[in-house]
Image (cartoon, coloured by chain):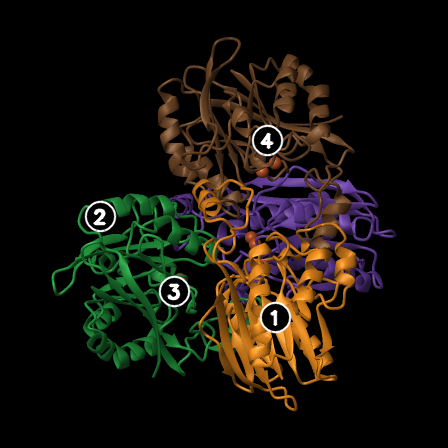
Chain colours: A orange, B green, C brown, D purple
Amino acid sequence: MRILFIGDIVGRPGRQALRQHLDSLVDTHLVDMVVANGENAAGGFGLTHEISRELFDLGVQVITTGNHIWDKKESLDSLLAEERILRPANYPEGVAGRGAKVYSSPGGVRLGVINLEGRVFMANLDCPFRVADRLVEELRRHTPLILVDFHAEATSEKIALGHYLAGRVSAVFGTHTHVQTADERILAGGTAFITDVGMTGSQDSVIGIRKEIAIEKFLKQVPMRFEIAKKDPVLSAVLLDIDEDSGRAHSIERVFLRC
Amino acid sequence: MRILFIGDIVGRPGRQALRQHLDSLVDTHLVDMVVANGENAAGGFGLTHEISRELFDLGVQVITTGNHIWDKKESLDSLLAEERILRPANYPEGVAGRGAKVYSSPGGVRLGVINLEGRVFMANLDCPFRVADRLVEELRRHTPLILVDFHAEATSEKIALGHYLAGRVSAVFGTHTHVQTADERILAGGTAFITDVGMTGSQDSVIGIRKEIAIEKFLKQVPMRFEIAKKDPVLSAVLLDIDEDSGRAHSIERVFLRC
Amino acid sequence: MRILFIGDIVGRPGRQALRQHLDSLVDTHLVDMVVANGENAAGGFGLTHEISRELFDLGVQVITTGNHIWDKKESLDSLLAEERILRPANYPEGVAGRGAKVYSSPGGVRLGVINLEGRVFMANLDCPFRVADRLVEELRRHTPLILVDFHAEATSEKIALGHYLAGRVSAVFGTHTHVQTADERILAGGTAFITDVGMTGSQDSVIGIRKEIAIEKFLKQVPMRFEIAKKDPVLSAVLLDIDEDSGRAHSIERVFLRC
Amino acid sequence: MRILFIGDIVGRPGRQALRQHLDSLVDTHLVDMVVANGENAAGGFGLTHEISRELFDLGVQVITTGNHIWDKKESLDSLLAEERILRPANYPEGVAGRGAKVYSSPGGVRLGVINLEGRVFMANLDCPFRVADRLVEELRRHTPLILVDFHAEATSEKIALGHYLAGRVSAVFGTHTHVQTADERILAGGTAFITDVGMTGSQDSVIGIRKEIAIEKFLKQVPMRFEIAKKDPVLSAVLLDIDEDSGRAHSIERVFLRC
Ligand SMILES: [Fe+2]
Ligand SMILES: [Fe+2]
Ligand SMILES: [Fe+2]
Ligand SMILES: [Fe+2]
Ligand SMILES: [Fe+2]
Ligand SMILES: [Fe+2]
Ligand SMILES: [Fe+2]
Ligand SMILES: [Fe+2]
């Protein structure tokens, strides 16, 4: 089974990069399923019904998210009731939405997707390692093909979770930093890993934000109204091949495309 | 002028990777100067006289550092009196050592090196953007060839400093996260940039630390005595070509070598 | 000279407590000047022209602030152009407003007021200790009576600044945590000190916020729209006596009044 | 039932203050049980067998702790096997020690003690609110008299937990900031509360540390070897009266004594 996993889509330029490249990527590489992190898809901050429909229409089958999913307050409950949208599973009990689910590819292969969020330099969530233990066990009853989007800041936490789940899931892909790392590899036991898949949005920016504003923020240390940048949209992703019987990853390949 | 910049050297496996690869890298690529981040060179934590001599003997001409330079308490003053060792320039007045200096290559070309440390998720230092303004102006009186090692955690702060200094320095190279990023490029005005050069140490680890201990730390949230990992040493670096008249970067190329 | 310093005024309940108690406090204790921290005076978040006029009309002569001063975006420049409003002095150069000034009491005694913000668990500002050095020296050319509002989170940073400035200023008063501490005292050299003056607002709350919402935030770890609480308004303050010739504090006394 | 709860004992000066005042406090106020936070009792950092024996000999019946309990690595497992020593209950499963227990006073009254640690600006622990829910339910099967030591940094988190447990426990006492707050009160439902009980150690210091070193740390932002201060030892505590039938608090009174 071949999966295309797309890193944090940031606003209109991110969706534009998707529109330009997704179909041909899927055709060329015979992609079975497309999973994308959409936490910044709506204007850089969060997700809406409308934008999620746009992503689904473009060919995304599952949308994972992260800390920014809470940015758009309106109708978050109904948005997260959508089965194809995940939010990090390690938010505490009682929070809207779900963090893991088994999906079926058009060809009928079952893929479990788990979305987790890091705690280092981030929110006080439940332990992603222990929540992963529980969810992996649950999903493995249905399928050995499991993909984890670990939305986290610190390289140490991401790599540690990769090793922790090595041999138990097909892939651990990091998101959140908006910069693609060059450390993709197959860990022991057949788990594909990359510290961060990178951003799908304007590269001539500071992680998607207009660079003049971001610089001003660092110089002045007062809150700023961020605007997303528009120039030089790029698509950052990884291509993953999984053995359908064992769930082991055969290969992981970085994708980085300009418009 | 061609410069090889080596990412955070972690303990003995990092020095081993250097010993195995440095000479041939320098010969093959006609490298004029070797700069390396040595903040973790001594057992993973800090730097000593002995280890710095070892790095110089192996062919490193300038050692930059970061937050871990303070880990080894003994003789830090005399260590930082060594002109070829820099610590981040934006530590406050009165702190031992220097953060920027103009060096000469064996061929007589002058290269300014500036070491800075980020503040996001790190210490309460002076503003790296404003300290950079002052140091760049000073160094440019002596040479237009200036390399900045920005030792920082957050991708946003690193990319913002890249854009901020674009056109004023030859290169802004990130260090500290121990994971090489895939976003090397030449910014406007001829400034080479990469968010993180990556680590020179054991890759079968959590950023250089034995993975079992790192995982235990995340699971238990109590302090642990870290040990550096030994297996699978790698060298992470970038090769930088600078125009000697203008100081503009011609090219930046990632280097990643196993042992 | 007798000064009444009022801790963080939070929204309407805080202003109500002021209205009820300020005149009689000033009359009873023969207060010469009233200084108040107003960073939360407008609906709990920031300050406006209208609210600052209300505070001045109620008898406040100088308004200090803190991290929340930036919450209300509109007309911040003109607000901070008002000479009787201070924002922390250790924001970087180029930020609107001022952080220190010499004021005159109705009786013609000059009082220097310095507003600083901590860095521990807060923003990446300039060093409050070093900025204090510079400002204290400047203000002492005009008067030995100097009051410092140190708006900070960590007890260690606040107490350290108290000792650091002991003998050089009349008082170091902490604000920001919204809880009055019981450690008021006169440090060496005649500097009055308290770690936190406390809040002027609804006590039946979580630091001024409706307790149900604050608890929900801790339980769910997702962003919430905070509302200020209304019940049980209290006024928290300190009364300070300064020797007009030497600037030394004679006494510091806590004030805590219900409505 | 009358309980004396003593705030963080810091090193030898803290133990000295205890030796000087504890017996007479117990006698004068007819105290039934003495509970003390001992996380800094051994040289300012952690606890040892020897020091815990000293505290028990002085009249402490139960020792609660906090983040510093892990500072002394040696024999932590056997130390935490001691039933009269608690560590915060919301450390994850698998960590040595226990976080709650029912004790009996010499007069045979049962008192449940729960130790929790905050997460704001602290470690990534399990949710103290939800762990409290579980433990309160367990302990209430044995006794309605329950005392919570909430070792936390942020006033908001401490006050929120106070309101959250109001009516379910006899008292929520904050520790960790080493500064006594002046907000002791009885919350709805008969729960005594104070944001922080304060420190038992040298007051002429920065939260127990020699002030010159603490100031140097803030000025230089490099790691320092802290030493505890010796001058001006104080004892900070609260006296709590609980109704033995209902578990409701009758009164809470601050104690602050110099040597
Ligand atoms: Fe993102
Ligand atoms: Fe994110
Ligand atoms: Fe490093
Ligand atoms: Fe570092
Ligand atoms: Fe405030
Ligand atoms: Fe504040
Ligand atoms: Fe403590
Ligand atoms: Fe503590």
Residue at position x 45%, y 80% in the image: B204
Q: Looking at the picture, how far across and down is residue A58, in whole percent?
A: 65, 66
Would you place residue C98 above or below residue A49 in this image?
A: above
Within 10 Å of disc 2 (Cα), the crowding (few <14, some 14-19, many 20+) is some
Q: Marks 2 and 3: same chain?
A: yes
Could you tell me the amino acid type at mark 2?
Arg
Asked if the residues shown at circle 3 and circle 1 are in contact, with their CB atoms under 8 angstroms apart, the answer is no
Image depth: mark 2 or mark 3 in front: 3
Please give the label number shown on residue B184.
3
Could you tell me the amino acid type at mark 3?
Glu
Q: Chain of mark 3?
A: B
Q: Marks 4 and 3: same chain?
A: no
> Disc 1 and disc 4: Cα gap in Å?
39 Å
Is disc 4 placed on a helix, strand or loop? loop
D253 or B31, nearer to the observer: B31
Q: Would you name the residue on which mark 2 appears?
A: B140
Would you place residue D71 above or below residue A238 in this image?
A: above
Q: Chain of mark 2?
A: B
Residue at position x 24%, y 66% in the image: B3
> Disc 2 and disc 1: Cα gap in Å?
45 Å
> Disc 3 and disc 1: Cα gap in Å?
24 Å
